[in-house]
Every structure is written in structure tokens, then in C-alpha cells.
């Protein structure tokens, strides 16, 4: 069963969000409902996503140097 909720936001933000939703061939209501469903998901799922990101960051440790400009060759390296 669907239940109505009310929220407040600046008018210009709402209008910009509606325009973006129209461009994506959907409605602001559908976008908010989708966000709410994602937000309400089980915490375990959120934790597993976080764990995957942390594992990726651990694999990159020592391979990424921050604080210097990359050379042209380093930027083009694949």
C-alpha cells in the first residue's frame, strides 16, 4: 500500500529536480520513491558495499601517490 508523505525544499531545487526527472523520462515522485527504497535497504547490504570499497582501497594502497603532478606518460599509461 502506498502512503503519501510531505517534505520541504527550496522551490528552485524542486523545479530543477522535476526538470531533470522529465529529461530522464520519469517523475520526481518516482525518483524520490526509488531513493527512499534504496535508503531503507537492509544495513547488511550497505555494509557489504562499504566492505567492497574498503577492499578496493586496500589493494590500491601504495600504488597511488597524491600530492604531485603526473607526467604525460603516466597519464596515458594503461
Image (cartoon, rainbow, N blue to C red):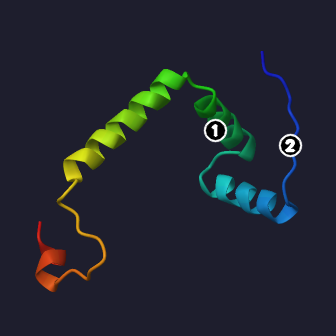
Q: What crowding class fits label 1: few (fewer than 14 Cα within 10 Å), some (14-19), or many (20 or more)?
A: few
Is 1 or 41 nearer to us in this picture? 41
Q: Is residue 25 above or below residue 23?
A: above
Q: Is residue 49 above or below residue 9?
A: above
Rendered location of residue 49, percent (x, y): 41, 34
User: Which residue is tagged 2?
Assistant: 7
User: Residue at coordinates 45% horizontally, 29% vertically from top-left?
Assistant: 47
Q: Give the CA distance from mark 1 to mark 2.
A: 14 Å
Q: What crowding class fits label 2: few (fewer than 14 Cα within 10 Å), some (14-19), or many (20 or more)?
A: few
User: Residue at coordinates 25% horizontally, 46% vertically from top-left?
Assistant: 58
User: Residue at coordinates 21% horizontally, 80% vertically from top-left?
Assistant: 70
User: Which residue is tagged 1?
Assistant: 35
Rendered location of residue 43, percent (x, y): 53, 24
Outermost residue toward the top? 1
Left-right relation of 65 to 53: left
Rendered location of residue 71, percent (x, y): 16, 84
Amino acid at each position: 500500500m502506498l502512503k503519501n508523505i510531505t517534505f520541504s525544499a527550496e522551490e528552485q531545487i524542486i523545479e530543477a529536480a522535476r526538470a531533470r526527472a522529465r529529461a530522464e523520462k520519469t517523475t520526481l515522485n518516482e525518483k524520490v520513491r526509488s531513493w527512499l527504497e534504496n535508503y531503507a535497504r537492509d544495513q547488511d547490504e550497505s555494509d557489504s558495499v562499504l566492505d567492497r570499497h574498503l577492499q578496493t582501497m586496500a589493494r590500491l594502497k601504495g600504488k597511488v601517490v597524491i600530492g604531485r603532478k603526473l607526467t604525460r606518460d603516466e597519464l596515458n599509461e594503461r
